[in-house]
Amino acid sequence: MDRERGAQGGMKRVTVIGGGIAGLGAAYEIAKASRSGSDVEFVLVEKDPRLGGKIFTDRAPDRGGGLYVADGGSDSFLTEKPAVHRAAAELGIADQLCGTLDENKRTFIVKDGRLVELPDGIMMFAPTKIVPLATTRLYSWPGKIRMALDLVIPRKERWAPGETARDHDETLESFVVRRMGRECLDRLAEPLVGGVNGSDPATMSLAATYPNLLEMEQKHGSLIRGFLAQRKRIEAMRAKAPAGAPRRTFFSSFHGGLQTITDALADAAGRERIRTGSAAVRVKRTGGGWRTELEDGTAIDADAVIVATEAWAAAQLAEGIDARIAELVGSIPCSSAATVVLAYDERDCPFDKRWHGILAPAIERRHVTGISLMSSKWPDRAPEGTVLLRGFLGGPRDEGVLEATDQDLIALAHEELADLLGVRRSATPRYARLFRWPGGMPEYTLGHLDRVDAIERLESELRGVAFAGNAYRGVGVPNALESGQRAARKVLGDLGVMGADAQREESR
């Protein structure tokens, strides 16, 4: 254990617990401050032998040559959120960014065991074009009429001046059924919105996940009118784009997979300061700082600690920091999930491949909740003549399926692909891998924003402590990265260490 320099007011040390994008983002911020002349260093500990957390790209060779780029966790981030783009520019990897192959951009919904294409003009789950809605087989005629009634159904209530979405929170289920009917929820909103967030629509907080929907109802009195206005703004922006300019896609990634960003963050922060295969089991106050005890019996003393783990793990570590924080973080429910990535010979996949994804609503009672055609969604994900598919299992509606073995889950996914797409049942995958994410999906239930506010208030009263990750203010990759950066700035401020950005501002 070595913290003498920090204790004597010289070099300050920060322990970062967790090597996902939040922890790596925090470590990178501290390394930048150090390179700018601040007397600060970090040590990062990660329980797994690898870095990246739920960002995991398996780059596997095919037996016939070429490479599979298989994202086992997150495979993309929202292009409109700038955090990853900003980091990529700083790290010198912006030229490796890529968008989706939008010439293949189609989505299908499973209905009665068959695939129905998502109608043109659907934005999230609201229709903005009449003819595609009228002709689709996705909804019954009573369901279509009920959705159209959104145009005339009044607001639930008018907000008082100064009120926001959080003052009028409700669940996704309540909101969608109220505005557009049960069929809209069951057939599209549940698999699309609830599935993306890994949450049960019956408990999912709209203010914490999609406050824009509540705001849209207030401003426009109707979701359809609100999304029509949004569509017009998007079309106007595209019309103003310079001729020949590349079209920005809704989602972005990297040519080498999403792990490109976490690898670059680790390299830039300094891998010599990172310890993998070291599980933190306890954090406690010691003298003027914090001691992190590891599973192997060793400990790290530091002036500050950043906890950037899953919520359930953070709650355990917080017990030695502040019992109130531990209780609040522990009240954030988490579900488990898995992804199965399979590659086949193209001849074993006799189906149209011009699409990105398939969603299976809960009412279809399938174990595979979604499918992505990775070789059609992204460039350079699979060797020529092969097809790369990814299936999603588990989540809050079907965690029990994850009790099966890896091989059984791979076989289950193969059967679902055969049933839904026509992949030959006799086909042997050229590549097959299962990725498990136990307790990796935080659920933002009603009251989530109040919980996070309370955590942050208590955190602000603790010198040299910060929490980061996807359990607090956004489950997306950019949100997690920003949470790590904010945590680093918080503890650097607590320690009186000026970060690189602050130094640049002062020198102006």
Image (spheres, rainbow, N blue to C red):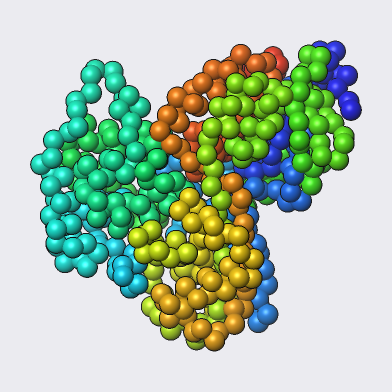
Rendering quarter of residue 431:
bottom right
Residue 178 location, x and y as percent?
A: 22, 42
Residue 325 location, x and y as percent?
A: 60, 24
Q: Give the residue drawn at x 65%, y 20%.
A: 322
193 lies left or right of 508: left
In this orientation, which residue lies closer to the viewer: 42 or 466? 466
Q: How many labels were placed on the picture?
A: 0
In what quadrant of the picture does the C terminus appear?
top right
Q: Is residue 234 above or below residue 401?
A: above
407 lies left or right of 452: right
Q: Is residue 310 above or below residue 100?
A: above
In what quadrant of the picture does the N terminus appear?
top right
Q: Give the residue drawn at x 18%, y 57%.
A: 143
* One can see residue 271 in this view: no
10 lies left or right of 504: right
Residue 209 location, x and y as percent?
A: 40, 38
In this orientation, which residue lies closer to the viewer: 443 or 29? 443
Q: Give the residue drawn at x 64%, y 66%.
A: 406
Rendering quarter of residue 272:
top right
Residue 36 location, x and y as percent?
A: 71, 26
